[in-house]
Image: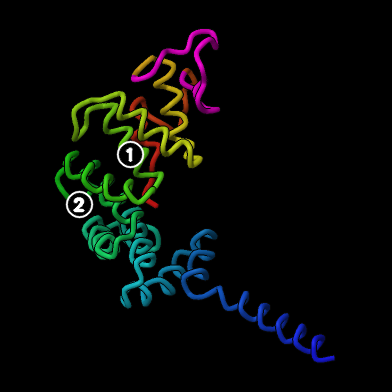
Amino acid sequence: MRLAFRSVIAAVFFTVASVAVAGPFEDGQAAYQQHDYATALRLWRPLAEQGNANAENKLGNMYAHGLGVLQDYVEALKWYHKAADLGLPNAEANLGLMSARGHGVPQDYAEAVKWFNKAADQGFAGAQFDLGVAYENGQGVPQDYDEAVKWYSKAANQGNGAAQFGLGFMYSNGQGVPQLRNGSARRPTRATHMGSIISASCTATRKACRKTT
C-alpha cells in the first residue's frame, strides 16, 4: 500500500516538474515562432533586463531584423554584447556576423573572425561554418583551404546544412581536399557530392546562408 502511494506521489511530482519547465522564455520562443513578435518582446525584455543571456541575444535578433521593433543595428549590438559578455556562443557569432556585414559598425572581417573563433571554440556550428567561409575566401584571415575544410567539417558533422554544402563545394573543386571525379574519391560525409548543386538560398561565397540565431 505504501509502495503504491509513493508511486502516485512520484508520478504527480514528475508531472508537475515537467510542466514547470516551461516559462517566460519558452513562451516567448513559442510566440516568436508564430510571428507574434509583440508577445515575444513583452516576455523577453524583462528577462533580458535581468541579465538572461538567451533573452538578451533574442532581443538583439529582433532589433537586427526589425521584428516587432524598428530595425536598429546599434540597439542589436548592445544586446548581443551583453549576451556575449556572459559567454553565450550564439551572441558571439552574431557579433561576428554584424562585423562581417558592416551592420552598426564599420565592416571588419578580422573583428568578425575574432568573434567567430570565440563561438566556434565552444562548439557552435554556425560560427564554425562562418570560419569556413572566412578561410575559404580569405576574409579577415589568409586564404587557407585546409582550414576552411576543417571548420566546414566540424559544422557539417553537427548537421549544419550550409556547412555540408560548403564542404561539398570544396570537394567538387578540389580545394583543400582531393577533387571528386566520377565518385572515385572517398566521401567523408554525405554532403561531399553536393558541390555542383546551385542553391538559390546561398551566394557564391555562401555568406547569405547564415542568419543571426
Q: Which residue is drawn at 36% across and 25% down?
A: 204
Q: Residue furthest bottom?
A: 2
x and y, in percent, of residue 189 in the image: 52, 28
Of tags 1 and 2, the one toward the viewer is 1
The residue segment tinted magenta is 176-195
Could you tell me which quadrant the N terminus lies in? bottom right
Q: Residue at x 47, y 27 (%)?
A: 199
The picture quadrant where one finds residue 30 is bottom right
- Residue 104, label in figure: 2
Crowd class of label 2 (few under 14; some 14 to 19; many from 20; radius 10 Å): some
The answer to whether marks 1 and 2 mark residues whose Cβ atoms lie closer than 8 Å is no
x and y, in percent, of residue 187 in the image: 52, 21
> Rounded to the nearest whole Å, what is the CA distance between mark 1 and mark 2?
19 Å
- Residue 56, label in figure: none
- Secondary element type, mark 1: helix
Which residue in the structure is indicated by mark 1? Answer: 130
Is the magenta region chiefly helix, strand or loop? loop
Q: Which residue lies furthest to the right in this view?
A: 1
Number of numbered discs overlaid on the protein picture: 2
Say what amino acid the circle numbered 1 marks: Asp
Q: Which residue is drawn at 52% across and 65% down?
A: 31
Side of 2 where 158 appears, left or right: left
Magenta stretch holds residue 192: yes
The picture quadrant where one finds residue 140 is top left
Side of 8 where 167 appears, left or right: left
Q: Residue at x 19, y 32 (%)?
A: 141
x and y, in percent, of residue 197 in the image: 49, 21
